Image (cartoon, grey):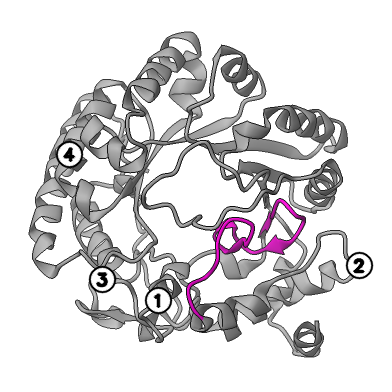
C-alpha cells in the first residue's frame, strides 16, 4: 500500500493518464480447479477456490463502468466450465448492466472436456469467442492430457456440424509447443486444416525447459517450414490464413520505441480478477493456482498486486499500475534482453518478437530480469523468420 502511495505522487505521462481507468478487458478466473493436469501447465499449486457471486458481480460492474465503448469479459480457470452455472449468471447480469452504447464481447478459454450440446448451444447463442486448448494429433495431445484426443476430436466434429457459424467465426485452437512436441507440429497443423479450423494460434510453454538444446533448432525450423509451405498453398487457394502467427499486415514491422514494454500488460487496460477477488494485470500473475519459484520473481511481482477489487483504494492502485510494471524490470527495456542466441537488440526480428515477460522469472535458476528463456527465444526467431516471408494479407 505504501508503495502505491509513493507512485501516485509521481508525475505520469499523458499516455498513462489516458490509460488509467480505461479498462477494455476483464479476465475472470472463476476457479483454480481443473479437470485436467497438463504436463506443462504453469498452474502448479491449485487451491480450492471458486469465485463468489459478489466478486463476479463487482468485476462485471467494473467492466460496465469503463469509458471504453467495447469491453471483453474473458472466462478463465483452471477450467472455467466447471463453473458453468456461474457463467450463465454472469452473462445474464452483464446483459442487464451494459449500456446501450457499449459492446460486450464474451470469451472463454477451455480444455473442452466437459462441453456438451447444452454448453455449446449457450456459447453459440451468446456469441462467445471460444479458445480451445488443444495440441493436435494424439502424439502431441498426449503430452497435454493423456488419452484426451478422441474426446476433443469428437467435440471439434460436433461444433463444426451443429454450430457452423461459431466454428467458422468465433472458434480458435490454441496450441502450446514444448520441445517434446516439436516433431508433431506440422502434422498437427495439417490435421487442423483438414478439420477446416479457421483460426489456430501457437505459443511456446512459459515454463523452463532445461531439456531444450541449441541443436534442436534445426528440427524446429523444419517443422515451421512445412507449416509455412502448407499455409502459403492454402492462402493461394482460399485467400485464408488459419495459422495466426502468419497473418501479417502491411507495414506492421516498424520500429518499436526504445525501452517500450514487452507485452500489453503495463497499459493497465486489462485486469485479471482472481477467484478470491484479488486483482492482477494478467491471469499469468494470479496466485490462486501457482507459487512463484523464487524470491527473485516474487520480489518483482508482489508490488504489482492491486489488492481486492472491492477495496476503496483499488482505483488508485489501477492508476499506479503502469509505473509499477516499469519498476518491476522484467516488462520493459527490450533492448537489454538477451538469450544464448544473442542480444535482442541485435536480432532481426526484435520488433515483432513476443516473449512473455513472466517466463523470465519462472526458471528457478535465473536471477537476471533481462535473461530470456532459450526455448522461447528460439521459437520466436524461427516462427518470425517464416512470418517475414509471408505476404501481407491486410
Q: 264 or 115, which is in the foreground?
A: 115
Q: Position of residue 316 (x, y in %)?
A: 83, 73
Q: Residue furthest top?
A: 162
In the image, which disc is placed on residue 270?
none
Ranked by sequence position, the earlier of labels 4 and 3 is 4
Examine the image and state in which quarter residue 51 appears.
top right
Ranked by sequence position, the earlier of labels 1 and 4 is 4
Q: Crowding near pointer 1: few (<14 within 10 Å), some, many (20+)? A: some
Magenta-highlighted stretch: main secondary structure?
A: loop
- Residue 301 lies left or right of residue 374; in this view the side is right
Q: 60 or 299, which is in the foreground?
A: 299
Q: Please say if 354 is above or below 249.
A: below
Q: Crowding near pointer 2: few (<14 within 10 Å), some, many (20+)? A: few
Q: Position of residue 108 (x, y in %)?
A: 58, 37
Q: Is any part of residue 15 visible from this angle?
A: no
Cα distance in 3D space between marks 2 and 3:
42 Å
Q: Which residue is mark 3?
A: 374
Quadrant where the N terminus sits is bottom right
Ranked by sequence position, the earlier of labels 1 and 2 is 2
Q: Which residue is mark 2?
A: 312
Cα distance in 3D space between marks 4 and 3:
22 Å
In the image, which disc is placed on residue 186?
4
Q: Magenta part of the protein: which range?
A: 271-294
Q: Which residue is mark 1?
A: 364
Amino acid at each position: 500500500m505504501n508503495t502505491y502511495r509513493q507512485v501516485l505522487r509521481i508525475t505520469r505521462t499523458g499516455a498513462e493518464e489516458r490509460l488509467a481507468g480505461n479498462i477494455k478487458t476483464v479476465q475472470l478466473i472463476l476457479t483454480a480447479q481443473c479437470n485436467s493436469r497438463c504436463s506443462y501447465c504453469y498452474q502448479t499449486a491449485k487451491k480450492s477456490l471458486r469465485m463468489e457471486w459478489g466478486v463476479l458481480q463487482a468485476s462485471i460492474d467494473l467492466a460496465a463502468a469503463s469509458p471504453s465503448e467495447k469491453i471483453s469479459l474473458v472466462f478463465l480457470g483452471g477450467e472455467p466450465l466447471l463453473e458453468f452455472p456461474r457463467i450463465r449468471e454472469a452473462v445474464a447480469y452483464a446483459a442487464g448492466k451494459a449500456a446501450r452504447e457499449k459492446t460486450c464481447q464474451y470469451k472463454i478459454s477451455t480444455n473442452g472436456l466437459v462441453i456438451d450440446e447444452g454448453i455449446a448451444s449457450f456459447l453459440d447463442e451468446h456469441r462467445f469467442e471460444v479458445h480451445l486448448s488443444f495440441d493436435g494429433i494424439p502424439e502431441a495431445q498426449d503430452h497435454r492430457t493423456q488419452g484426451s484426443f478422441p474426446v476433443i476430436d469428437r467435440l471439434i466434429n460436433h461444433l463444426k456440424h451443429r454450430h457452423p457459424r461459431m466454428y467458422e467465426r468465433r472458434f480458435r485452437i490454441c496450441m502450446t509447443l514444448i520441445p517434446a512436441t516439436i516433431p508433431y507440429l506440422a502434422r498437427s497443423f495439417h490435421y487442423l486444416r483438414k478439420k477446416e479450423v479457421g483460426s489456430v494460434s501457437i505459443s511456446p510453454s512459459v515454463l523452463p525447459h532445461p531439456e531444450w538444446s541449441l541443436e534442436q533448432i534445426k528440427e524446429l525450423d523444419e517443422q515451421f517450414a512445412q507449416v509455412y509451405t502448407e499455409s502459403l498453398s492454402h492462402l493461394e487457394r482460399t485467400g485464408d490464413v488459419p495459422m495466426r502467427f502468419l497473418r501479417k499486415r502491411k507495414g506492421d514491422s516498424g520500429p518499436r520505441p526504445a525501452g517500450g514494454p514487452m507485452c500489453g500488460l503495463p497499459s493497465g487496460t486489462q485486469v485479471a480478477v482472481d477467484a478470491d477477488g484479488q486483482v492482477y494485470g494478467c491471469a499469468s500473475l494470479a496466485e490462486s493456482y501457482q507459487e512463484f519459484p523464487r524470491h527473485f520473481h516474487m520480489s518483482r511481482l508482489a508490488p504489482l498486486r492491486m489488492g481486492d477489487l472491492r477495496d476503496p483504494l483499488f482505483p488508485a492502485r489501477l492508476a499506479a499500475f503502469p509505473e509499477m510494471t516499469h519498476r518491476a524490470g522484467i516488462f520493459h527495456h527490450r533492448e537489454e534482453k538477451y538469450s544464448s542466441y544473442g542480444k535482442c537488440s541485435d536480432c532481426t526480428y526484435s520488433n515483432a518478437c513476443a516473449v512473455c515477460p513472466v517466463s523470465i522469472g519462472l526458471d528457478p535458476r535465473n536471477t537476471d530480469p533481462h535473461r530470456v528463456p532459450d526455448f522461447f527465444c528460439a521459437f520466436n526467431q524461427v516462427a518470425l523468420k517464416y512470418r517475414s516471408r509471408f505476404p501481407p494479407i491486410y
